Image (cartoon, rainbow, N blue to C red):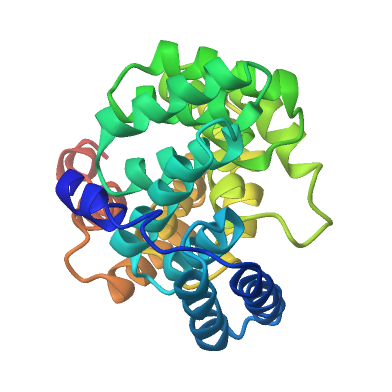
Amino acid sequence: MVTALSAGCASLGKKKIVPESITACRKLSRDGVAAMEMNQWQRALELLQQAVETNPTDVDARRHLSEVLWQKGDRQDAAVHMEAAVQLDPHHAPTVVRSGEMLLALGAEERAMQRAEEALLLDPNLAEAWALRGRIYRQQKQPARALADLQQALRYAPHARDALLDIAELQYSLGRSQHCLTTLHHLLDTYPPGDEPQRALWLEGLAYAAVGRGQDAVESLYAANLRGKPQADLLHDLAQAENAAGRPAVAADLARQALAVDASHQPSHVLMAQLQGSAAPDPAATIRR
């Protein structure tokens, strides 16, 4: 991938740019952004490709083209163009961060870390740079360092939803369920009622269960289950919460729903076996009576 990124930028600066080309590029770029805002992704792609061809050194056109390619799933090409934008404007920290985010998503952790460090040197107050480095540490199984950087990101962007959710997940994984709930409530307060994301509600339910608030866990998990398509893992977690609340029949029905979604879902098979076993009469108890 490194070779591809380098090759994609090799021809930069070779074409002589005249004012007419700059004007045409800017118009194409503006029209491309307008198409992006209307979710006309193919039209935006065509316009921004023309803009870059007209003026390969226009940083904004490169950035916008990269984002359109990313949206359309052409992630390798998107990273190439964002890398080109960094070469054209190496002192623009947000562009450096975005390049790092793309590299991380493509699995290039070392390159992404370089970008995060570069961005922090350029702007140590940039929340996105701290968040990027925190996510890299998290991916590298360094939760304490990840948590420290993501919390630093919140110093500069206190309501950053992605960072809040990342922090909550890390706190839960570290056994800090009460802290996790505090972070989640901060996150959920940023959404209008009914718009809360499934992932946050799901985690809230798990954290409630971990601190012994069984009924709250059930309510949060039911709310999560109403968001998006049915998921076997979520239905299983809800079944466990209902069983812990003393409603094994409801739990069994939810486990069956999980198996209807994914017949091979092993945790639900195990739970069903446990529920059936607990429901079966004890022969020894019958003899004693």
Task: Give whichever of 20, 263 is nearer the camera.
Answer: 20
Q: Is residue 78 visible?
A: yes
Task: Give whichever of 131, 267 is nearer the camera.
Answer: 131
Q: How many marks?
A: 0
Q: Residue at x 71, y 73 (%)?
A: 30
Query: Where is residue 22 drawn, in percent x and y?
Result: 63, 68
Q: Residue at x 45, y 26 (%)?
A: 116
Task: Give whichever of 17, 261 is nearer the camera.
Answer: 17
Report the side of 81 relative to 119 (left or right): left
Query: Where is residue 21 drawn, in percent x and y?
Result: 59, 73
The answer to whether 65 is drawn above or below residue 133 in the figure is below
Q: Is residue 178 visible?
A: no
Q: Quick one: quadrant of the C terminus?
A: top left
Report the side of 190 relative to 94 (left or right): right
Query: Where is residue 135 drawn, in percent x and y?
Result: 43, 30
Q: Residue at x 72, y 78 (%)?
A: 34
Report the side of 29 relative to 170 (left or right): right
Q: Residue at x 50, y 67 (%)?
A: 65
The answer to whether 256 is drawn above or below residue 108 in the figure is below
The answer to whether 234 is drawn above or below residue 95 in the figure is below
Report the side of 230 relative to 1 (left or right): right
Query: Where is residue 138 drawn, in percent x and y?
Result: 37, 26
